[in-house]
Image: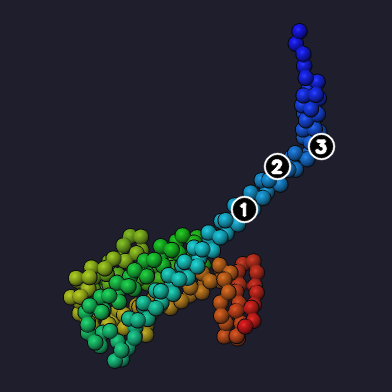
C-alpha cells in the first residue's frame, strides 16, 4: 500500500492555490507589465545614449574639419601657399579630406534631419567644385566622400590650389562655415552644455533648456 506524505501534499497545494490566487487577482499581470515597462525604459535609455554618443562624435569631427579647413585658408606670410612647401600642403589637404570624410560618414549615422541638411549643402557645394578639385588630384566619390591622389596633388599648380583653399570665399572657407554649423547643431541635438558669451553654460534640446552659471 502506497503512503503519501501529507505535509508535502499540503505545502504543494498551498503553493498552487497561492499562485492561482495571484494570477486571478491580476497581480501577476501587473508584475509582468512592470517588468516589460522597466526593460522598455532601459532599452530606450540605451538608444538615447547611443544617439547622444553619435552626435558628440559628429561634433568632434566637424570641429576637426573646421580647424583643418581654416589651416588652409590662412593668408599672408603664414599661408602654406606663400611658403610653397608641397609636402606641407599635401599633409594639410590630406588632413582636410580625412576630416571631411569623417564628418560626412558620422553625420549619416545620426539620422538627424537638421545635420543631414547642412551636410547635403556641404556635399552639394563640393560637387559644384568637382572639376576644380579633380584638377588638383581630389576625387568626389559616389558616396560623397573624397579621395586624394597625393602625387597629382603635389604636381598641381599652386595657383589652382590657392584658388580652392586659400582665403575668404574659397571652397575651404565655405566648408569651414558649414562644419561650424554642423558642430552647433550636433551640440544642440545632444543636449550637452556649451559655453556662451554671457558667461553661462547652456544647452537646448528638443525636450529641455537649462543654464549653468559659472
Mark 3 surroundings: few (<14), some (14-19) or many (≥20) residues within 10 A: few
- Give the distance between the C-alpha atoms of the residues marked 2 and 3, in whole angstroms: 13 Å
Where is residue 42 drawn, in percent x and y? 62, 53
**Residue occupied by mark 2:** 32
The relative height of residue 43 versus residue 105 in the rendered view (above or below) is above
Where is residue 134 drawn, in percent x and y? 25, 70
The relative height of residue 95 versus residue 1 in the rendered view (above or below) is below
The relative height of residue 133 versus residue 158 in the rendered view (above or below) is above
Q: Residue at x 39, y 74 (%)?
A: 65
The relative height of residue 111 versus residue 89 in the rendered view (above or below) is above
- Give the distance between the C-alpha atoms of the residues marked 1 and 2, in whole angstroms: 15 Å
Q: Nearer the viewer, residue 71 or 161?
A: 71
Question: Which of disc 3 and disc 1 is earlier in sequence?
Answer: 3
Residue 20 shows in the view: no
**Residue occupied by mark 3:** 25
Q: Quadrant of residue 29?
A: top right
Amino acid at each position: 500500500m502506497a503512503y503519501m506524505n501529507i505535509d508535502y501534499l499540503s505545502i504543494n497545494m498551498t503553493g498552487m492555490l497561492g499562485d492561482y490566487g495571484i494570477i486571478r487577482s491580476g497581480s501577476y499581470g501587473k508584475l509582468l507589465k512592470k517588468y516589460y515597462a522597466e526593460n522598455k525604459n532601459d532599452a530606450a535609455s540605451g538608444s538615447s545614449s547611443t544617439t547622444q554618443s553619435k552626435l558628440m562624435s559628429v561634433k568632434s569631427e566637424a570641429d576637426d574639419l573646421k580647424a583643418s579647413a581654416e589651416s588652409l585658408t590662412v593668408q599672408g606670410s603664414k599661408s602654406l601657399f606663400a611658403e610653397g612647401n608641397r609636402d606641407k600642403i599635401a599633409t594639410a589637404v590630406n588632413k582636410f579630406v580625412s576630416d571631411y570624410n569623417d564628418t560626412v560618414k558620422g553625420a549619416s549615422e545620426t539620422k538627424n534631419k537638421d545635420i543631414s541638411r547642412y551636410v547635403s549643402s556641404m556635399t552639394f557645394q563640393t560637387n559644384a567644385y568637382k572639376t576644380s578639385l579633380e584638377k588638383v588630384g581630389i576625387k568626389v566619390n559616389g558616396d560623397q566622400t573624397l579621395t586624394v591622389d597625393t602625387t597629382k596633388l603635389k604636381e598641381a599648380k599652386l595657383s589652382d590650389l590657392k584658388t580652392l583653399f586659400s582665403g575668404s570665399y574659397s571652397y575651404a572657407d565655405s566648408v569651414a562655415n558649414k562644419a561650424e554649423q554642423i558642430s552647433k547643431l550636433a551640440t544642440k541635438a545632444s543636449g550637452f552644455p556649451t559655453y556662451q558669451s554671457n558667461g553661462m553654460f547652456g544647452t537646448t534640446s528638443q525636450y529641455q533648456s537649462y543654464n549653468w552659471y559659472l
